[in-house]
Image (cartoon, helix red, strand yellow):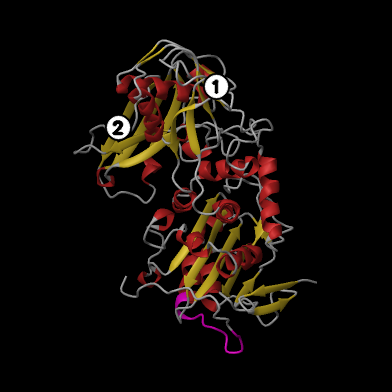
């Protein structure tokens, strides 16, 4: 038996009370029937902030795969461990500052910087160039010891080893090891699509076999496009993910069609190994700066006592969490899990961080806050997993704790997409009454559909909303999700017999917004 104090309310044995509704509202049952999904395949919890028990709890304790909704667990752990202002600093180091004239070694230590973009990578080397170092001849060492090699390969999850969302994090990783391609339809049907890279990699070539078609743009604009990855110098064994055999030359072949009304779209591919990406991006950026390089780039240990010649600081953690949750960025989430293991500063390089040690740190952070989730299975913190599990009840308790106990509840909520406004929920539901009234993280996998976050009820009080569907018909439950949100917004109210503590009040949005 344990006691949990929430905003002035003492709840002993806080299991869902029998007085909480154990029946789904009729509108949800109708939506499930129309979708052909058994009610036993979904879990639903609606729980008012600072209310002692849920308003609705259906299959609440059943462990289910949450897909990307698992990023809520990673978000809590990161905010509680570091606070929203945490940053990572990537540095260029040299043995002796006073003698540095481009001769001798340079080094970069991987600190697990989740926000090391190509722009910041260029900024780092621009600082070197502006200090009068224009000709580099010494070797450049890239120190990757912070993260241990992960057991899984990029194609393990869904055999899409070249897609950006499957990139395996590294301690020193630039641009999430991804090349982004802009795609624009031609002006007339039959014309090839206009395709160009955000950043040119000399080792990556495009073979464009696409054409424009008439008609409206589908919700899944990529549905008519197909890709193939070919080695410039083909071998006998098929290549399924970035591999050293591609690093000397790789061809991205795009085929298929795209409607003229789609406008400019973006698609990302990871085609080079991490060392080749670092090498190619450095050489290109250094040449653009006007510098020359005659040395070698290689993986190697960089002494931590070498002086710092140049540095670049990441955006604050809160900005990275916005990117992670609004756009469901798997690489940021997986990197943060490893950062939690090494505490994000590279000091654990002698004992490289693993996903197992990151998982252990997350459970430790939860336990210290009284959040005991024995059924939870955490694999990589991103939800890109067939193994991960958590119950709707415990997701609800996590969301409640962040608003009732955490110092960072407002920041946590801000990272979640606003329904029909931004992120992955920009164009989600048809009912205009839902717009901007819910902050929710969504999740989708084959056989999984999930939604969890916060919303305003019929009385403009904040409630926690959790929806998990696992099963063959899960992907057809969008209408069921909309029916749930509509019920929350138009019918759900504070129970007459319930009490609500006002020790923490969340402001409702401007009704004119």
Element under disc 1: loop
Asked whether residue 251 is in view, the answer is: no
What type of secondary structure mainly makes up the magenta span?
A: loop
- In the rendered image, the quadrant that contains the N terminus is bottom right
Residue 26 spot, x, y in % from top left: 54, 78
Residue position for label 2? 195
The answer to whether 417 is drawn above or below residue 379 in the figure is: below
Residue 19 spot, x, y in % from top left: 67, 83
Residue position for label 1? 238
Kindly identify the residue that appears in the image at 50 percent across and 65 percent down. 481
Disc nearer the start of the sequence (2/1): 2
Q: Nearer the viewer, mark 2 or mark 1?
A: 2
Near-viewer residue (37 or 150)? 150
Residue 478 spot, x, y in % from top left: 48, 61
Residue sticking out furthest to the bottom? 496
Element under disc 2: strand
Which residues are drawn in magenta? Answer: 489-499
The answer to whether 476 is drawn above or below residue 502 in the figure is: above
Q: Residues within 10 Å of mark 1 (few under 14, many from 20)?
A: few
């Amino acid at each position: 038996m344990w006691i949990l104090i929430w905003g002035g309310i003492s709840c002993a044995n806080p299991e869902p009370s029998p007085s909480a509704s154990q029946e789904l509202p009729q509108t949800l049952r109708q939506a499930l029937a129309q979708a052909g999904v058994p009610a036993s395949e979904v879990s639903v919890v609606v729980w008012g902030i600072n209310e002692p028990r849920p308003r609705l709890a259906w299959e609440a304790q059943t462990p289910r795969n949450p897909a990307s909704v698992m990023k809520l667990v990673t978000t809590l752990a990161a905010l509680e461990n570091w606070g929203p202002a945490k940053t990572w600093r990537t540095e260029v180091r040299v043995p002796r500052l006073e003698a540095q004239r481009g001769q001798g070694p340079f080094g970069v230590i991987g600190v697990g910087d989740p926000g090391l973009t190509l722009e910041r990578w260029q900024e780092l080397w621009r600082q070197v160039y502006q200090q009068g170092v224009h000709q580099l001849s010494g070797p450049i060492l890239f120190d990757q010891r912070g993260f241990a090699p992960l057991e899984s390969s990029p194609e393990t999850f869904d055999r899409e080893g070249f897609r950006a969302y499957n990139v395996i994090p590294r301690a020193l990783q630039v641009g999430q090891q991804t090349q982004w391609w802009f795609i624009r339809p031609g002006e007339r049907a039959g014309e090839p699509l206009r395709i160009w890279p955000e950043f040119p990699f000399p080792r990556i070539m495009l073979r464009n076999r696409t054409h424009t078609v008439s008609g409206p743009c589908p919700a899944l604009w990529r549905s008519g496009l197909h890709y193939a990855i070919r080695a410039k110098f083909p071998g006998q064994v098929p290549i399924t993910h970035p591999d050293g055999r591609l690093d000397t030359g790789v061809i991205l072949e795009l085929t298929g069609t795209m409607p003229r009304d789609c406008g400019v779209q973006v698609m990302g591919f990871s085609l080079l190994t991490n060392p080749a990406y670092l090498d190619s991006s450095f050489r290109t950026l250094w040449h653009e700066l006007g510098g020359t390089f005659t040395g070698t780039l290689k993986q190697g240990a960089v002494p931590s006592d070498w002086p710092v010649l140049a540095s670049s600081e990441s955006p604050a953690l809160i900005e990275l969490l916005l990117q992670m949750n609004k756009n469901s960025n798997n690489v940021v989430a997986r990197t943060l899990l490893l950062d939690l293991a090494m505490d994000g500063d590279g000091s654990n390089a002698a004992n490289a961080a693993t996903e197992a040690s990151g998982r252990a740190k997350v459970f430790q952070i939860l336990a210290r806050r009284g959040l005991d989730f024995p059924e939870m299975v955490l694999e990589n913190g991103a939800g890109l997993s067939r193994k991960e599990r958590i119950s709707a009840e415990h997701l609800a308790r996590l969301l409640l704790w962040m608003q009732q106990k955490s110092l960072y509840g407002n920041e946590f909520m801000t990272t979640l997409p606003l329904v029909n406004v931004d992120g992955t929920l920009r164009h989600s539901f048809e009912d205009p009454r839902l717009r901007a009234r819910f902050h929710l993280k969504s999740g989708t996998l084959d056989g999984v559909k999930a939604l969890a976050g916060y919303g305003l009820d019929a009385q403009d009080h904040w409630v926690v909303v959790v929806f998990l569907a696992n099963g063959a018909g899960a992907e057809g439950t969008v209408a069921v999700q909309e029916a749930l949100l509509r019920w929350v917004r138009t019918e759900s109210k504070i129970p007459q017999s319930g009490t609500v503590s006002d020790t923490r009040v969340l402001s409702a949005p401007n009704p004119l917004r």
